[in-house]
Amino acid sequence: QVQLQESGPGLVKPSQTLSLTCTVSGGSISSGSYYWSWIRQPAGKGLEWIGRIYTSGSTNYTPSLKSRVTISADTSKNQFSLKLSSVTAADTAVYYCARGSWLQESFDSWGQGTLVTVSS
Amino acid sequence: SSELTQDPAVSVALGQTVRITCQGDSLRSFYATWYQQKPGQAPVLVMFGKNNRPSGVPDRFSGSSSGNTASLTITGAQAEDEAEYYCNSRDSSGHHVVFGGGTKLTVL
């Protein structure tokens, strides 16, 4: 059973860069059957897909955040990461990492989520 | 605004049937996937593809699709089904993932 765990600072100052890491256990991020995504959820609001990284290393981001987002992977550590630059209070949210299945076209495993607050 | 539209809230009497819908142009070409989220928890996959339930999801959950509308039906709703339900699929370009705004299901 694959497990995902987000980690990173819970507080980021405005204009700075938010950085989170997702550590995957019980499965390899190099498996060609899956891709790896970040998804966020502001308090009391819905889910917003941020982007994904494929096993090839190529990435795909939601258009509204594309200019500020970078997702990368470290296969040696079985981790993938999110960087979101120039953050504002609007980026305050619970951030989830998730595994996407090509076959099922679904997110079949999720991390527990980590709250990131943007505030000075 | 999301490219997938869901009713914000739906209620159902205990033991009755409820249908939660998701509308969007991309659903004419791609299946919707459904997630259940309870307060303070991560979303959980409950339906994918044409009508496929992951292991562990009760068979009272079923999925269907017609035109630009996908539906998640709960036949014989239980108290533990009270949650927020999200659909997701691709956007109109087919290259990105989008989520619906979510439907809060109340079991009366």
Image (cartoon, grey):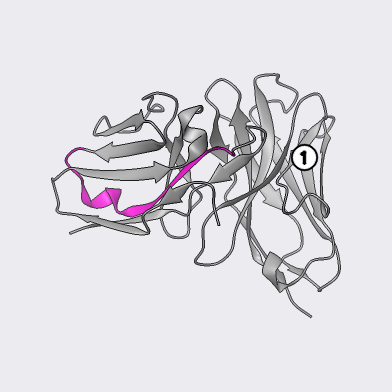
Q: Secondary structure at mark 1?
A: strand
The C terminus of chain B appears in which quarter of the rendering?
bottom left
Q: Looking at the rendering, which quadrant does residue A12 occupy?
A: bottom right
Q: Which residue is mark 1?
A: A80
Q: Is residue A55 left or right of residue B4?
A: right
Q: Is residue A17 magenta?
A: no
Instruction: Give residue A116's position: percent from left, percent from top.
Output: 69, 64
Q: Position of residue B56 (x, y in %)?
A: 36, 31
Please tell me which residue is depicted at 36% across the width and 25% down the height of the picture. B51
- Viewer-closest of A90 and A72: A90
Q: Quadrant of the N terminus of chain B?
A: bottom right
Give the residue type at disc 1.
Answer: Phe
User: What residue is shown at x 44% (from left), y 29% (from top)?
Assistant: B48
Measuring from the top left, give residue B96's x and y in whole percent.
65, 38
Measuring 35% from the left and 30% from the top, which residue is drawn there?
B66
Q: Determine which quarter of the picture holds residue A40.
A: bottom right
- Report the label total: 1
Q: Quadrant of residue B105?
A: bottom left
Residue range in magenta is B75-91
Residue B38, above or below B57:
below
Residue A91 in the figure: left or right of residue B22:
right
Taking B40 as reference, is A120 left or right? right
Residue B82: in magenta span: yes
